[in-house]
Amino acid sequence: MVPGPQWGSGSLARLILYLTAFVFLLVGIPALIVLGQWWAAPSEPSGFTIRLLREDLGKVVEMDLEDYLVGVVAAEMPADFHLEALKAQAVAARTYALYRLEQREAVPGGEADLSTDFRIGQAWISPEAQRERWGWYRYFQKRRRIVTSVRETRGEVLTYQGKPIFAAYHSTSGGHTQPAADYFNPVPYLLGAASPWEEASPYYLTSQSLSWQEIAARLDVELPTELKQLLREGPFLGPDDVSVYEPDGPGEETVLPGESLDLSSFFQITELYPTGRVKGVVVFGHFFTGRQIREKLGLRSNWFTVKAEPAGVTFTVRGYGHGVGMSQYGAQGMAAAGRSYREILLHYYTGVQLEDWY
């Protein structure tokens, strides 16, 4: 009698492995494709078409508002933030986009409604850029969270007197948001609010140093003569700086009189807003607003203190961004404390309504 096939434990294990791989190829991959399509974009169009200037491509593309929002939330807020914070971001971004459409505030040139350049609107990144940033596996995980935040708030918009608001937002306020009147134009729903949930932000308190030469160049002003001499010859010495002893003498101290220079006079904060942010500054005898100083010197916000030193100025800065409207790290802190996206939005935007726009 011819013996039948012998199935050892190794052969059986290989058979199970092959069958598992076959089932995965037959069922798993199509399922992943379907899930990938589910994660790719919101389910229903909004009926609003956005003409978006893609700065990376140098051309205008058209897309539905809800599709556009996925790219905005991906660019503007970390995808691993709490879902309620992501939902608050989705509503704020949707509201801002509709505000721009209602105001007919087109991108310079008039061919686009919005730009991917955050300096003139909202940041936006494509699915391809998201995959490159996060990697293939994490792309599906993170994009799913973002699409969910957009889907679950579909059509929701913040309004004031029946119209979409200027839904400004920023990274980190530093503890208190500032009224729009202190940075942009006054509006009744951007009055400033306490934001004590932000200490986990890496931008809550930071420092930055600039040389006197850099400051003068960025502000387009001349260095004072005394400061030029200081930079050329080194610091002036005051009475506390130098003491001389005669090695063979009785050990009596002889002080060499020096000349002191008040460095703080070259960079003076002259006025503050009630929140503590800088309103006015005098640099080398020239007046600048706190906003001008922030933007020209590249500071993270206009809430800062200064320390003048022989080499330049060290800035201690609170927060990141203009400080108006919703704080993103504040939203994250509120969500972690159990607040809903509605509570987050109604905290940072005063006297507004949350409406279903479509």
Image (tube, helix red, strand yellow):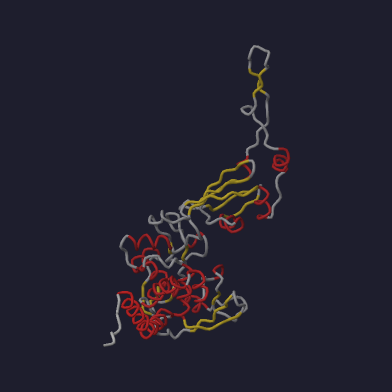
Residue 191: give x, y in percent of width and height: 43, 61
Q: Is residue 76 visible?
A: yes
Q: Residue at x 67, y 12 (%)?
A: 249
Residue 107's quadrant in the figure?
A: bottom right
Work out whether 49 lies above or below 284.
below
Residue 350's quadrant in the figure?
A: bottom left
Q: Nearer the viewer, residue 304 or 56?
A: 56
Q: Is residue 160 visible?
A: no
Q: Nearer the viewer, residue 49 or 250?
A: 250
Q: Is residue 107 left or right of residue 146?
A: right
Work out whether 196 lies above or below 28.
above
Q: For the N terminus, give its image quadrant.
A: bottom left
Q: Is residue 132 left or right of residue 267?
A: left
Residue at the farthest left position:
1
Residue 289: give x, y in percent of width and height: 58, 55
Q: Nearer the viewer, residue 273 or 175?
A: 175
Q: Residue at x 47, y 61 (%)?
A: 171
Q: Residue at x 65, y 50 (%)?
A: 286
Residue 21: give x, y in percent of width and height: 37, 80
Q: For the C terminus, give its image quadrant.
A: bottom left
